Amino acid sequence: MHQDFLPAGIVVLTGAGISKESGIDTFRDKDGLWNRVNLEEVATIEAWHRDKKKVLDFYNDTRKMLRAAHIAPNAAHKALAHLEQKYDGEVTIVTQNIDPLHEQAGSQNVIHMHGRDGEIRCMHCGTVFASDIDLTPQSVCANCKTVGELRPNIVWFGEMPMHMDEINAALERCGLFMAIGTSGEVYPAAGFVLQARRRSHVYTVELNLEPTDNQPLFQEHVYGPATRIVPPYVERVLKRGWPQ
Ligand code: BV8
């Protein structure tokens, strides 16, 4: 098909809110993680250099929480997988989440811009491993044998998010930008809606439990729990598309 006739792409930015009803806490709600843990002590590169054991123990606990038996994809994750299967254009999920729930729901085109659970990286040789083991400051890299340089393959504050070229390309091609379950407080993710709007024909919608500070940047707003608002919105897009 000629490029001009391919249906416009859809980019879906998701945040912790989409996984909340799967049993994973968000970060900035009143019961959120950053209200219990000081992110400066566990989610920055400085924290890792200051107290590796504290940071590694935090992510060892995070991994165990994410692997609990009751954690499973919810209707919102499944609706997005359905969208990817049924929409005849490209659907790209850009997630800020490190959990695997989009993939477990059946989504294939998922970009984890803040890294993902179950992967570790050696700060000495850069090798990334799939790994579920608890890391300690005594852990040894299987590749370069360096001791104490293994960390979660997660993007901390002050570090460059991953796959930015791929994300920027998807934003260039999209006709519909949906943000689901994100407070719009963390950059560069929070700036993607403005980046998408630089394209003349792009429609932007915020689907969230409640309005965020980014609300004025979106043309449409749907508020409520993700499992209640995402499935019908996906059906609407598949049946009628979006305002051009
Ligand atoms: C970068 C990994 C530049 C850890 C995360 C000083 C120095 C350096 C950078 C900065 C700085 N000051 C500011 C910055 C930029 C910084 C930033 O934006 N800070 C904010 C706090 C002001 N950003 C960065 O540091 C980023 N890197 O800028 O690099 C650079 C450039 C060149 C070279 C080198 C570097 C890196 C950011 C990534 C940090 N890592 N996570 C981990 O996950 O353990 S970010 C953290 O916040 C989370 O991981 C999460 O991914 C992210 C966003 O949070 P949300 O997903 O939106 O979750 P939140 O709780 O906030 O909101 C949930 C929403 O859901 C709410 O709105 C709620 O209403 C809604 N909700 C709740 N329930 C439901 C629901 N919605 C629907 N249904 C429901 N049931």
Image: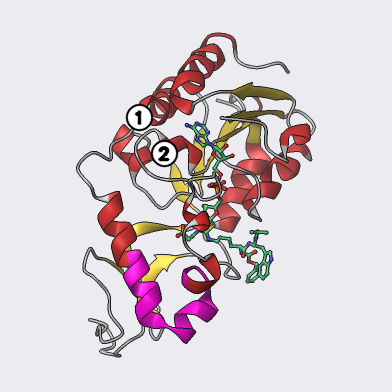
Name the chief secondary structure element in magenta: helix
Q: Is residue 110 above or below residue 60?
A: above
Q: Quadrant of residue 193?
A: top right
Q: Which residues are magenta?
A: 42-59
Which residue is the site of mark 2?
19
Can I make out residue 128 in this image?
Answer: no
At label 1, the amino acid type is: Asn
At label 2, the amino acid type is: Ser
Q: What element does badge 1 sit on?
A: loop
Q: Is residue 131 above or below residue 230?
A: below
User: In which quadrant will I find the C terminus?
Assistant: top right
Which residue is the site of mark 1?
74
Q: Quadrant of residue 187?
A: bottom right
Magenta segment: does it hold 54? Answer: yes
Q: Is residue 178 above or below residue 34?
A: above
CA separation in Å, label 2 and label 1: 7 Å
Can I make out residue 215 in this image?
Answer: yes
Q: In the rendering, at what x and y percent does residue 10 appear?
A: 57, 31
Disc number for residue 219: none
86 vs 72, nearest the viewer: 72
Q: Residue at x 22, y 63 (%)?
A: 132
